[in-house]
């Protein structure tokens, strides 16, 4: 789904990268995709989010699809949430579809999404 420097299927451009040397405090908003390899303390709103293995997010996610391979603590609002085997999630999940791989660490409360 995500590859650094690759155009998405609609041709809208490349995914934005928050690299491993970046630490952001505050809100990050994009109409496209975001790859988080560094750290964010705050909120991310985007189309699709991929949290890489060494990345950390303390805050909320609003996305069509979120893939967590790193550490996330907060609330996720998404149509699809995928937590990879290396993922560590602690928080609240509001998602229509959830996939958790064997080995992932999840401590979550599930909330019904409002339409």
Image (spheres, rainbow, N blue to C red):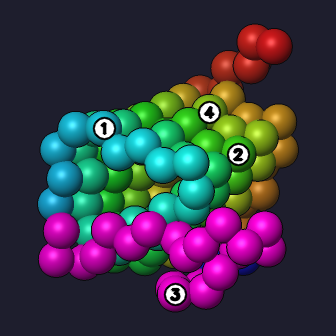
Q: Secondary structure at mark 1?
A: strand
| Quadrant of the rendered image containing residue 25 | top left
Q: Closer to us: mark 2 or mark 3?
A: 3
Question: How dense is the environment of label 2, judged by Cα within 10 Å: few (below 14), some, or many (20 and up)?
Answer: some
What residue is shown at x 22% (from left), y 38% (from top)? 26
Label 2 or label 1, whichever comes before in sequence order: 1
Residue 36: x and y in percent read 40, 66
Q: Is residue 102 visible?
A: no
Residue bearing mark 3:
5
How much space separates mark 3 and mark 1, taking CA atoms?
A: 23 Å
What residue is shown at x 19% (from left), y 53% (from top)? 24
How much space separates mark 2 and mark 3, taking CA atoms?
A: 20 Å
Residue 34: x and y in percent read 49, 62
Label 4 or label 2, whichever comes before in sequence order: 2
Residue bearing mark 1:
27
Residue bearing mark 4:
77
Front residue (pair 44, 106): 44
Task: Specify the label residue 11 is tagged with.
Answer: none
Task: Specify the label residue 64 is tagged with.
Answer: 2
Q: Closer to us: mark 4 or mark 1?
A: 1
Q: Closer to us: mark 3 or mark 1?
A: 3
Q: Are marks 3 and 1 in contact (CB under 8 Å)?
A: no
| Quadrant of the rendered image containing residue 78 | top right
- Which span is picked out in magenta? 3-22
How much space separates mark 2 and mark 1, taking CA atoms?
A: 17 Å
Q: Label the magenta part by its dominant secondary structure.
A: loop
Residue 77: x and y in percent read 62, 33
Q: Secondary structure at mark 4?
A: strand
Q: Closer to us: mark 4 or mark 2?
A: 2
How much space separates mark 4 and mark 1, taking CA atoms?
A: 15 Å
Q: Secondary structure at mark 2?
A: strand
């Amino acid at each position: 789904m995500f590859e650094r420097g690759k155009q998405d299927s609609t041709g809208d451009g490349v995914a934005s990268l928050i690299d491993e040397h970046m630490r952001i405090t505050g809100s990050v908003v994009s109409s496209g995709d975001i790859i988080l390899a560094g750290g964010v303390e705050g909120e991310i709103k985007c189309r699709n989010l991929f949290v890489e293995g060494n990345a950390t997010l303390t805050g909320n996610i609003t996305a069509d699809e979120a893939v967590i391979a790193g550490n996330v603590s907060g609330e996720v609002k998404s149509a699809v949430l995928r937590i990879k085997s290396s993922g560590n999630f602690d928080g609240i999940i509001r998602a229509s579809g959830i996939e958790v791989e064997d080995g992932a660490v999840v401590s979550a409360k599930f909330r019904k999404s409002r339409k």
